[in-house]
Image: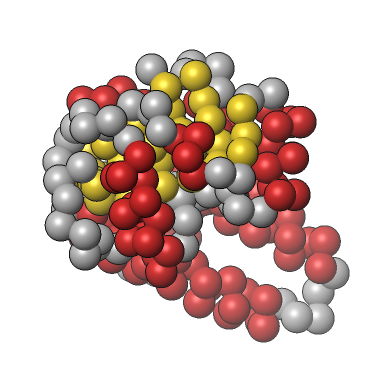
Amino acid sequence: MRVTIVGAGKLGKSMAVRLAPHFELVVIDSDARRVAEVREELAVRASGDLRDAAESDVVLLAVPAESIDEVGQKLLSLLPAEAFVADMATGHVSSLGSNRIVSCTVIGHAIEIQRGTPAVFVIRPAVPSLVSVLSHLGDVLEGDPIAAAITNRAVCTAIARAYRDITQDLGSFDPRLIRAALVNMGAGTLKALADGQAGPFLKRLLQEMGLQREGRE
């Protein structure tokens, strides 16, 4: 299967790193520097010309939301009739009215995706060729991409507020302590809560906050 990623920013490049071993991959970006970096680092075909997507089975469109419809229109004129385009812009709804452009919201972070942490891709409809490609990056769910986008925004907003409060409250502390607490303790705590694997320290904190009854998992 031939897969093209249009857009070699953080998300596009992270997906390219993970997909390169599995597919005939093409990466397209209008930035010549990004094209050169992808070509050198991943040893895949990289180009600044959208026409190089012409023979693709699947296109992952990882460009800013304001560019989606313009680029999508060009892709539809180039691609085979059976090819599909995944619109990866969070919360975006294409105005092109084509059933070959599938909305896809990524619940995941580009750096974590590149590291191999599974993301979740919410798409509608669940086109088999897209599912086949995206399953190499994480779980693929058929559902409402807008609801997934709202989830993304709510979680990111809450974490950003917590970050603001933490850095303000601990502003006089050594920055190395704050960073270690955020990167290691903070990230680990969120994962433990999400997975239901809170340890004794976290369980005690939850009890003190009235968020968990004593003895309850």
Q: Tell me, yes or no, if residue 36 can be seen here.
A: yes
Q: Measured from the top left, where is residue 23 in percent x and y? A: 47, 18
> Along the line of sight, which residue is nearer the eye, 109 or 190?
109
Residue plotted at (68% across, 42% down): 35
Q: Identify the residue at image location x=53%, y=30%.
A: 26
For the point 69% across and 23% down, the residue is: 43
Nearer the observer, 12 or 179: 12
* Residue 182, quarter of picture: bottom right
- Measuring from the top left, give residue 15's x and y in whole percent: 51, 36
Residue 192 found in image quarter: top left
Q: Which one is in front, 124 or 38? A: 38
Image quarter (top left, top right, bottom left or bottom right) of the C terminus: top left
Task: Give the answer, above or below, for where 133 lies relative to 173.
Answer: above
What residue appears at the point 81 percent right and 68 percent down from the top-left corner?
A: 175
Residue 153 appears left or right of 83: right
Position of 74 with respect to 31 (left or right) is left
